[in-house]
Image (cartoon, helix red, strand yellow):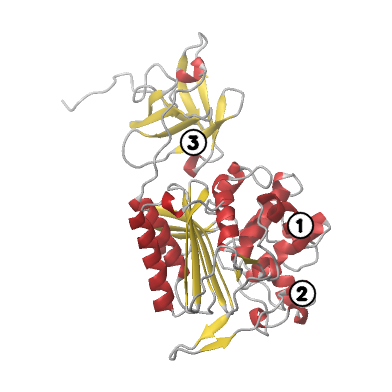
Amino acid sequence: MTTPQEELLPTTRRALTHRIAVAQAEGRTPSLVAAVVRGGRTVWHGARTSVEGHGPDENVQYRIGSITKTFTAVLVLRLRDEGLLDLGDPLEKHLPGTGVGEATIAELLAHSGGLAAESPAPWWERTPGSLRPELADVLGERPLLHPVGRRHHYSNPGYTLLGALVEKVRDASWEEVLQREVLDPLGLERTATRPSAPHAGGWAVHPWADVMLAEPVEDLGWMAPAGQLWSTTGDLARFAVFLTRGDDKVLGAETVREMRAPAAPAEAADVADGAAYGLGLQIQSQGGRMLVGHSGSLPGFLANLTIGVEDDVAAVVLTNCTSGPLLAGVGADLVRIVAEAEPRIPEPWRPLREVDSSVLEVAGQWYWGTHAFVLRLTPDGGVSLGPLSGQGRRSRFRAKGDGSWTGLEGYYAGESLRVVRRPDGSVSHLDLGSFVFTRQPYDEGATVPGGVDPEGWRGIG
């Protein structure tokens, strides 16, 4: 997957190297390794280290912490796509007896199930998973801190439950299912629940002195689906391509797009920060650019995966210190550097191979009351509807096969769009969730609920 460094301009490569050099030096971390993906391939790899003559490459493993959650979410979405469960199902339907079974699978994926952020003491990241031998030990006596579905509250135990759900439905361990259904099909040969050489050691750096302390490495037991994995920049670059484009061996493009859509109620602070959470993915609006991915941390390690979907650029950043550089910012900067220095070159425009004349007939300008909209045909056989100019409700629509379409996003998601014809076959209007769109503002020749004033349009006399 790695391609020659020359695929990026020298000035771009230098800017990327400068950014990670500043992060490693100012963040005071033993090592930092990064990769950039563009157009589905790794086009840059960089590393900075405090060890003379040694630079970690794309095959050196680091612990990736909560990026593990995205892998667990992929396993759950596979179960949904196979029809084995529905995201609206309460957990109790498939994994009874947890005491938090009213939370739906979607709510657990989006951290809106009301669960506590952490497992009860002792500190689960720094102690063996064997101290929590049962799910009840992970959840504790008070697993719910908030009403189910009311707010986004990040929960590590919530992903423990999702891992247990995968085990129950598949009748196999989470680790076995992950290997068989995600890691092997995607060719992620250096991603695993336990490290294998070469791998980095985890360190804590003293906040007020340039000295280090080795951090413990624990097997997380039941908490593994929330943060157990080790991986490399090479493997996570491949995973970023999958999260951008999908792979029918694992999840199709439509499902990974669903993962990238906001799925949790946003706090006021989140709205101000432009932050949201999807189904196992963090979402951030930054500088007009929509970024998706996930960060991770465990004692001795920090990790970040950032994808600019519209720019078709992704970045992976891994480091081996407990606290130091803010990797989400580093990842966002790596995406921005490439996207701004070398903007994506669009594919050549090509005409459609064929077009349905009855669909072409309804393309063009429509009015919702007095608001002007445009309906366009899309290359995938659907249509899009949005304001003629400025801001407003817009959506893509997928053809249903009966001459109507279903909204895919925004206000019109799930709503039905259909063409209403007169007895002679001519087009009267569009019906979108019962709202009428006409060829002229309040077209007299169309059926407009409430009627159209017979005196017509007039000024003030």
Q: Earlier in the sequence, mark 3 or mark 2?
A: 2
Q: Of 375 and 81, which appears nearest the observer?
A: 81
> Label 1 belongs to which residue?
177
Among all residues in the image, which is located at the extreme left? Answer: 461
Q: Is residue 123 above or below residue 94?
A: below
Name the amino acid type tagged 3: Arg
Rounded to the nearest angstrom, the CA distance separating label 1 from label 3 is 35 Å
Q: Secondary structure at mark 2?
A: helix
Q: Nearer the viewer, mark 2 or mark 1?
A: 1
Mark 3 — residue? 396
C-beta proximity under 8 Å, tags 2 and 1: no
Q: Is residue 421 visible?
A: no
Q: Is residue 325 visible?
A: yes
Nearer-N-terminus badge (2/1): 2
Residue at the spot of label 2: 136
Sequence-first disc among 1 and 3: 1
The tally of labels here is: 3
